[in-house]
Image (tube, rainbow, N blue to C red):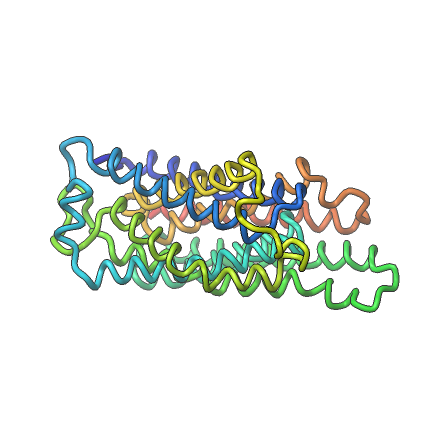
Amino acid sequence: MFIIEQTGLAIGVCLLAMLCWGSWSNGQKIAARDKVPITLFYRDYVLGIVLWAVVAAFTLGSLGEDGRPFLEDLRKADWAMLGLALAAGVAFNLGNQLLVAGIQAAGLAIGMPVGTSIALVLGLIVNYLAEPEGNVALLTAGGAVVLISIACSAFAYLKKEADSQDGEDDAEGSKTKGLLIAGSAGLANGFFFWMITTSMASDFADPERGQLTPYTALVVFAVGMVISNPLFEQILRRFADTPEAAQLRYRDVTTRHHWVGVGSGLLWGLGMTSLLVASTEAGNAISFGISQGATVVGVLWGLFAWREFKGAPTTASRWLWVMGGTYVLGVGLIVAARLGS
């Protein structure tokens, strides 16, 4: 089983997770541009995560002499730990579908920062209480700076919306809907990482009986996403799909667009695997905190690749740049909390 035993490498792998998590939603933007129903994109996205989890379990999770191979680990797993990893998949699926709906309503440059920033602050608290590791002062400072970045992104969004209302009756609702949905996603996503890491062994090289290796935990996590998806899909249908798009069937989507969804899931799964494998060496709170730097990656994609703020007032762009700077500072403080402990 592939494991990581060096702190520097663990932090580097967490940065890889950050890049993956900040980039997968480009697939959603492609689907939206080409008028593919977001619910159907998300089905393929979940399929991609499942495919990655299974492949990783039988390769990275089974090869080599260290640790416990996937199938053996699954046989020795405690039902309570399996249930916790499964529940983590359900919790994440709820939060992520809300995040997707928030991005659909508010744009990548705003929906991503609001949703992931709230998840970051809540996740830092939950994961640190479960595993007190790292400099608490630096962790607190990093979380506080991230909260400032949330406010900056909200100001940027409000400035943009105010400039483009054109007197529509529903302007006030459109101005706040994306922020509210993305904020709800952050509240839901603040707990899933604690749930899945609690189900995992503390020593991957010599895992305790009953506890899971990260690869087994990810497979069970993916199963939780699959079984909850038909129910939570109604969230996307309610908030993100137009009535016309909702009439399209899965087989109406082109093969290319199916692969866009699957590819997005594969990319997210790679990030999740990286995060779980690095979690024991970097610390749960630290690794989760670094991964949420995906917000900066998402903002950069939204600004430069998708031109989401093209034509927006100068004040909106300024708030976005302040948001990016404060977020980088916040994540830097979180990294320093681990390196300085």
Total numbered circles? 0
Q: Residue furthest top?
A: 64
The answer to whether residue 5 is seen in the rendering is: no
Residue 260: percent from left, percent from top: 53, 38
Task: Choose top left, top right, bottom left or bottom right for residue 296.
Answer: top right
- Rendered view: 98 above or below 336: below
Side of 305 where 236 appears, left or right: left
Q: Residue at x 20, y 44 (%)?
A: 204
Pick the front one: 279 or 35: 35
Q: Residue at x 38, y 47 (%)?
A: 287
Side of 115 where 53 appears, left or right: left
Residue 224: percent from left, percent from top: 35, 57
Side of 222 where 241 appears, left or right: right
The answer to whether residue 25 is seen in the rendering is: yes
Residue 329: percent from left, percent from top: 54, 46
- Rendered view: 168 above or below 120: below
Q: Residue at x 69, y 65 (%)?
A: 176
Q: In which quadrant will I find the N terminus?
A: top left
Pick the front one: 132 or 278: 278
Task: Choose top left, top right, bottom left or bottom right for residue 115.
Answer: bottom right
Q: Residue furthest right?
A: 167
Pick the front one: 306 or 115: 306
Task: Choose top left, top right, bottom left or bottom right for residue 30.
Answer: top right
